[in-house]
Amino acid sequence: MTDAPQDADARAQAEAPASTGTSLGAWVVTGLVLLIAVVVLLPGLGAAGLWSEGEIAVLDRSLAALGEPRSDMVRSPWLPDQLRTWSFAALGRSDLGLRLPGALAGLGLVGLSVLAGRRLGWSPVWAGVAGLFALATPLLLSGARTVLGNPTGELWSSAAVLACLAAVRGEELSGARRWIVLALGVACLGASIASLGIALGGALPLVVIGLGCSAVVRGEGGDADASERSPLDQGLRAAVWVGAVACAGVGIRLVVGQGEGYIPLLAAAKDLELVEDPTRRVFSAGLEDFGYGLFPFTGLVVAGLFAPGKARVAALWLGAAVVAISVWSLIYGETPAPVVVPAALLATAALRRLVDAEASLGGRRLILTLAVLGALILAKDAGRTPAQVASPLFFLGEGRFPGAHLGLDETLPSLAMRFAALLILAYALSPAGRGREALSSALPTDPERRSIWERLAARVEEFMAGVRERARARGVAALGGDEQAFAQRQQTLATAVVALALTAEAFAFGRGVLDELGGQLSVAGPLASWSRSVEAGADSRLAMYRIRNPGVARYGPGPASELFLSSRAELDIYLSGLEPGMDQTVDLVGKAGEVAEVSREAWRSALIRRTDLPSAYAGARLRGHPFHVLDASHHDYVLVANFLPEGAEDQNPLFEVLHQTEAEIEAVRAEVDNQTKVAWSPYVELVAWEVGGDLHRGGTMVLDLVFEVQRPLPAGTKLYARLQKGKSSRVGAMPRELTGGTMPPNYWRKGDLIHHHEELEIPWLEVLPGTHELIVGLRRSEKKNLGISTPEGDTGEFGVMIKGKKREFAVIGTVELDW
């Protein structure tokens, strides 16, 4: 008993150099990580505008606090709104000011992750890796680059946990320092309650502190036995649990007695949809949100849970937070989990073990397998539902989410697969370590007694051992025979690869995905283009057709200069240079097919929905109105005008499929290789086709069809274009929209050349290799197809063959599919 304090002091002295974090190297690494975080989080913070859904509601609360009249506001915790309002007012009511507190909270969470790593006794480099892990998580990036979520609340909660743990456990703190840290932790706990409520901001951090005080971490020596603790230690630990129980009790009492209103002490109002139908959300939905919020590191975090080592407190922290949030979300709806710091610590703990030469080979491979499989699974989910990954703090639904417009179904999976590849590279570069002998000895010594899998494992192991041995021999020779120096170089190189991977993930998601997404979910971009059109000489009124967007009040010219057009006819009249409301029977401009000129005094621009563009363009060219698209960058809105400023280009997306001039028609005909002749009189004629891409099972087929128009097709006409071999092997069997819906066929006009381009996935199982026929047809309705008029017989020019007695389908060529 008498030796215990001496042993503890010895351990503290031995670990002091690794945990104080006062060395120059520690400060350099911390400064570098924070510099990277600043570069990722702060530049361009308010450039793309606020999201019309989600962020404008937060703006309204700040404007209401500054005295502007607002209605239908959503209540939220006091402290985060107050911080945003102060910053918003101080920085001239700019978007930057509204988002700055969240960005600074993100920087704080990165710094706390580095600090927590150092407190665990990790080297400055590994503590910096923990900070990069925190920076690269979508949870932190989304909260810091927008005003969604509650990053300031998570910052206070995490700071309270770390400070109170250090003070209550008395790690390297004594006298006044301990009381100062404890006071800091209590202050952060109060701020956490003001930001997250008494349940998530009070009870949850106190439970984590209590669990952390009770944890005995292997390899650290742990805390002293209860009988050896000082009365102060025992009193502080008891106070933590008493506080946790008190906060939880008050929170449960408020939840049970809560009606439909908002309770400030809980910082939440019940989700009325869940009140009406509790089955709309299940407990596992919280786990799913947690996994998407840590994309693509979820597998690595789970691996850290299995063997946290010194990060055992982080494992308890993460588990308590995820369970609490999952239960909370059953009543209050989707809520982000405050797990950035513990997740970063666990991911780093798993990574340290992955590249540690002293760790068992089997354990390292298990970590690698979990991390890579997790990344690949998340890559598949991100390709299927990109909205849940790209916007983890505000789910829009796939129908309203601009994932297809931005290509996020390809971008996000590529991020996950790149991280998996770099993780494998880091493992390959790390020292071989121990464990291979044990693995080999587990196999039967007699090769004849080994199964095919055991023989395969032995061959792979021999091959990998040979590669590693040759690389090791060359490296050691280059370093003059110093094997220890070579092992250190390997570990340094592996760590550098991981740090590079995390930095690339942070930049790609924070400055790439989120910036592009913000530009699509805000109306600021199209309205900025409208402002430029006014500077070029257009009417100073903001004309809008079928647009109701809360962002217009923020970025528009104001109600006095807004003009709402109630019909297509009013839009046509306005763009003709006349005033809406006049007699619509007036012959507006010239003859059909001739584009009239508009005087500079009659220059007009209007903001319309992208779905209204085909009809507006068709009406304009029918009457001979000039019609141009000045901005088509937004997925939902386009800015159209009856003039084109000097030096500007028409951005009309219809021109990607619609070609009218002789030069355009000749260029398209030259692009598409195979000529054909299939007509559906009196509507259209198919004149060319081409099939390319990866023509094998699991590949992507690229199909191009070129139609000459004689007359507009009936509205709703769809295209059959499939590859078929026999009766069972088919690709693209279902009818699809012509031009993918870009230019509906009822707006086509005589003389147009329509270029239909699409990509089709070739199934893995439903397709057989070999020669497939390319069969085309047009569906008039669900019960009727259009009949083919040319060729008149069963065969025609360019090898065309008619299928069926009703002459509804034609074979226009053959395509070879490989395995």
Image (tube, grey):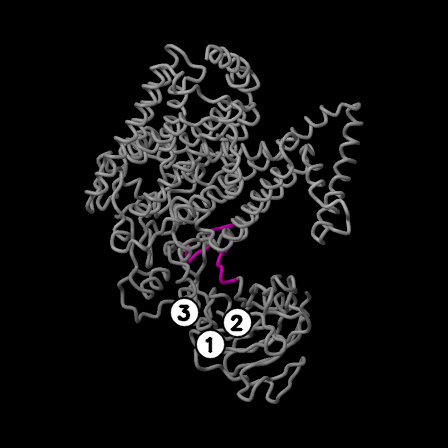
Taking the spot 72% from the left edge, 27% from the top edge, the residue there is 486
Mark 1 sits on what residue?
A: 713
Of badges 1 and 2, the one in the foreground is 1
Is the Cβ of the residue at disc 2 closer than 8 Å to that at disc 3?
no
| Residue nearer the viewer, 752 or 812 | 812
Residue 507 visible in the displayed image? no
- The 10 Å Cα crowd at callout 1, few under 14, some 14 to 19, many 20 or more, is many
Amino acid type of the residue tagged 3 in the rendering: Arg
Q: CA distance from mark 2 to mark 3?
A: 16 Å
Residue 752 is labelled as 2
Is the Cβ of the residue at disc 1 closer than 8 Å to that at disc 2?
no
Look at the image and give the residue range highlighted in magenta. 639-655
Q: Position of residue 449 (x, y in %)?
A: 74, 51
Q: Earlier along the polypeptide chain: callout 3 or callout 1? A: 3
Q: Position of residue 431 (x, y in %)?
A: 68, 32
Res 261 → quadrant: top left
- Disc 1 secondary structure class: loop
